[in-house]
Image (cartoon, rainbow, N blue to C red):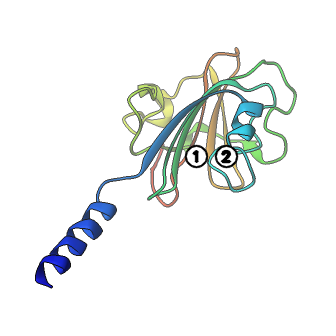
Amino acid sequence: MLTLRLLLLCLACTACSGPDINEIVLQDLEDAKAKGVLREGGWLPSYLPSSSDHIRLRYDVDTNEVWVSFQWKAPDPEPLGTDCTTTNPSEVRLVRTEPSWWPEALSSKQKASQLPISYAYHVCRDGAFVALSQTGETSYYWSQPGSGTVGH
């Protein structure tokens, strides 16, 4: 009986240990939809520009943190629709943790005054942020509920 209890305790500890982080590379939003990650309340926001492609999505099931890199075809007069509004870099909440592929220029190591001017910064209704490249280079979306560093 004691052995069975120890075995169950070990299984429970193993199931709860470590973060549940997933990463997926997607061709475009249609690919994301087909794989079930693009939906209302899903890991990938449905308000990214419709031309988004070369998407890299990383998410943490335990913390609900999401990091996305993507490319899009500029110019689009309203690439994020009405879900996001342009914001001043000083209002951007920078990521506190990031994947190895995340640009240092958008990490918490930076100050708002040092954020690259090649991006238009947006805050979204769901609390997420987008650094949208003006030139069609890689853009970034991140959401870290209840955490992060506000640029200063």
Left or right: where 57 falls relative to 72: left
Question: Helix or strand or loop: what does disc 2 sit on?
Answer: strand
Badge 2 crowding class, 10 Å Cα cut-off, few under 14, some 14 to 19, many 20 or more, is many
Q: Amino acid at mark 1?
A: Glu
Give the residue number, with chain letter if any, for mark 2.
Answer: 123
Q: Quadrant of residue 120?
A: top right
Give the residue number, with chain letter if any, for mark 1.
Answer: 91
Q: Amino acid at mark 2?
A: Val
Closer to the camera in the image, 59 or 91: 59
Q: Quadrant of the N terminus?
A: bottom left
Residue furthest left in the image? 2
Left or right: where 58 falls relative to 40: left
Which residue is depicted at the point 81% across and 31% down?
50
Left or right: where 44 falls relative to 76: left
Left or right: where 49 falls relative to 121: right
Closer to the camera in the image, 130 or 58: 58
Which label sits in the foreground, 2 or 1?
2
What x and y, as percent, mark residue 113?
49, 31
What x and y, as percent, mark residue 100?
38, 29
What x and y, as percent, mark residue 101?
43, 26
Closer to the camera in the image, 40 or 118: 40
Residue furthest right in the image? 77
Badge 1 crowding class, 10 Å Cα cut-off, few under 14, some 14 to 19, many 20 or more, is some
Q: Quadrant of residue 52?
A: top right
Disc marking residue 3: none
